[in-house]
Image (cartoon, coloured by chain):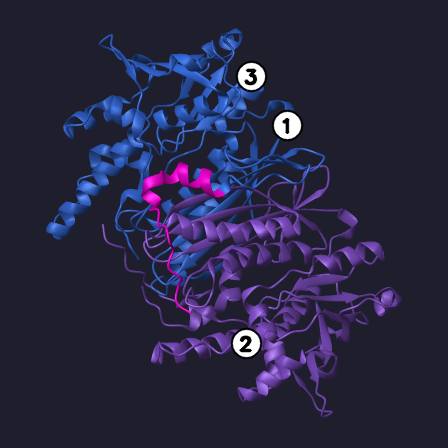
Chain colours: A blue, B purple
Amino acid sequence: MPEQPNIKRTEIRDLGEFGLIDRLTAAFPLQNESSVKGVGDDAAVIDNGGFMTVVSTDMLVEGIHFDLMYTPLKHLGYKSVVVNVSDIYAMNATPRQVTVSIAISNRFSVEALEELYDGIRAACTHYGVDLVGGDTTSSLKGLIISVTAVGQGEKEKLAYRSGARPGDLICLTGDVGAAYLGLQILEREKQLYLSNPGIQPDLENQQYLVSRQLKPEARKDVIEMFAQNKLVPTSMIDVSDGVSSELFHICKQSGVGAFLEESGVPIHPEAQMMALKFGLDPITCALSGGEDYELLFTIDPSDVEKIKYLPDIYIAGEITPAADGIKLHTKGGNIHDLKAQGWQHFEEENLN
Amino acid sequence: MPEQPNIKRTEIRDLGEFGLIDRLTAAFPLQNESSVKGVGDDAAVIDNGGFMTVVSTDMLVEGIHFDLMYTPLKHLGYKSVVVNVSDIYAMNATPRQVTVSIAISNRFSVEALEELYDGIRAACTHYGVDLVGGDTTSSLKGLIISVTAVGQGEKEKLAYRSGARPGDLICLTGDVGAAYLGLQILEREKQLYLSNPGIQPDLENQQYLVSRQLKPEARKDVIEMFAQNKLVPTSMIDVSDGVSSELFHICKQSGVGAFLEESGVPIHPEAQMMALKFGLDPITCALSGGEDYELLFTIDPSDVEKIKYLPDIYIAGEITPAADGIKLHTKGGNIHDLKAQGWQHFEEENLN
């Protein structure tokens, strides 16, 4: 009756999240005609004969993805929808529905869950999506939220991770690194509070950075601009794990290399300053921080006129042949290999 | 920084699962034309202009829904897909895709997860669905599996919970109560093992009951028979929480009552015998046990010829006007109110 001993034991952290997903899902061939795209993009693509149905899912776990000590439940509900609709936008599609499943311990009151759902509702209203289902169950410990977003896309306009070609321009929306620095501030204030509960948190001057962490937004506006300007990116991904990690995904799946310009990576002045205050390299925060929910995409160079006058879009480099590797051209003039450092939750030792 | 005290604190167990869902999702009006059916059926229904897209999601939590002491990971993977495709069949639709998200602690090795995915793959092959996405993350404690199933249905053939009318016949597939009794056997053997680890579990003579708990199947065959016989049930639901609970859902959403015949509720002889051995009333196990993943449906009386010669379908009563209530006609000739007792996970005291 007890678990059978495994002859071989490979630790999950030895593979990492993406290695684990590759290994677990390798032997799943697609059987249905309607399954256009399976594992390995921001979302799955399903053809039911009308619009393409685009499906994405994400799980948020208390103690791993969020800390309720500084995350208001309403913000958490909002963010849990945002991270999923962001994946739908990253396919150049429009999110329409979400399902929300939660597992909760009895520590949570009905009123606390209503706050969570207030945030979910605010995000549904803002992004024009409908809550159409879910599951509600108990957990032995903490709060787990699993959201699935369903969107509509047009077959010819979907943007996959696999479409980048040498010569394409690498573009980024908004600015990156701020959400990571917001998290550092919240963690610092939490530690101060724990060591002296009488102290008041000092967040007043860091509203921008903190709000980027606690209440991120998905780039609905950018997808709408693409439609108005008849632009279809050759590839696209949303920045959840960090620009470097996302660029690696695009390069791997497109079979290309990249030449990224440090000077082209948009960093907010407050993020720049706060990084230095923490003794961190701003460009490292920008490239490896993650949770920005900006869009990283590539366009055919002939489309450059279509984005030139659009607000909040920055050209940050060029796609190269695979043999050229994935390089960062620093402001100081050096060229070195880009490192992909996404979130590595599995490195933590939580043997439960 | 700490959680703000709530002025009012309502415990989740005071509402129950369905009361909680009603309260949390009440203020979510549908905004999109494509959202045909939202919260409150076995699955959401989305119209993207081709086939109707049917979406259902379920979360399984270690320690709540399964006990790894007697649940092989492969069976668990299989069951996690089954419970979701069962919801799609309960819409009279065909499952096509699943996404599988898991949260895992470092207690699990890669090999253990491969066993889980072996079971997921076996179910995908058996039910003809494709694994098209998911999320893999850490948990602080235990294993959590969240599966979303996506199916195709034809607009005129979907079966909702809301379509039953007085005079319709109540039908049940297979037999009910066996999964619940299988669980009782496994729990008994676990307790014996815990009190004396040298003892061997005695499951040999209860293979049917135990397999109904550990490796349930969804009624793909029944949906295929419906199509062959051009039968569209007036309402349908799958039996996950128990026949009584499911019949209450149909009655509530259809605005009708029901007259259930105890003699029409199919109980397997082994379930009958095992219930008596445990000192339980067989009909109570059959009506309140749950996890059978059989189909409870209603048909127009003029369709009775279409099911009369089909195997494994039992007529178990009749839909009545709402004013007549929901009644059970016992074998002894008594008529009394049916009680809905689904799983009540929230009654447990797990304040974490």
Disc 1 residue type? Answer: Glu
Disc 2 residue type? Answer: Glu
Please tell me how crowded label 2 is: few (under 14), some (14-19), or many (20+) other residues with Cα within 10 Å: few
Disc 3 residue type? Answer: Leu
Q: Do the residues at discs 2 and 3 belong to one chain?
A: no
- Is A40 placed left or right of B156 in the picture? left
The boundaries of the magenta stretch are A1-24
| Helix, strand or loop for disc 1 | loop
Q: Earlier in the sequence, mark 1 or mark 3?
A: 1
Please tell me how crowded label 1 is: few (under 14), some (14-19), or many (20+) other residues with Cα within 10 Å: some
Q: Chain of mark 2?
A: B
Answer whether residue A20 is magenta in the image: yes
Examine the image and state in which quarter residue A98 appears: top right
Residue shown at 55% from the left, 24% from the top: A159
Q: Do the residues at discs 2 and 1 belong to one chain?
A: no
| Helix, strand or loop for disc 3 | loop
Answer whether residue B191 is magenta in the image: no
Residue on which disc 3 sits: A231
Q: Is residue A314 above or below residue B171?
A: above
Q: Is residue A20 above or below residue B2?
A: above
A282 vs B4, nearest the viewer: A282
Residue on which disc 1 sits: A154
Q: Chain of mark 3?
A: A
Residue shown at 71% from the left, 91% from the top: B334
- Is A91 placed left or right of A201 in the picture? right
Residue shown at 60% from the left, 58% from the top: B40
- Is A144 placed left or right of A125 in the picture? left
Residue on which disc 2 sits: B204
Q: Chain of mark 1?
A: A
Please tell me how crowded label 3 is: few (under 14), some (14-19), or many (20+) other residues with Cα within 10 Å: some
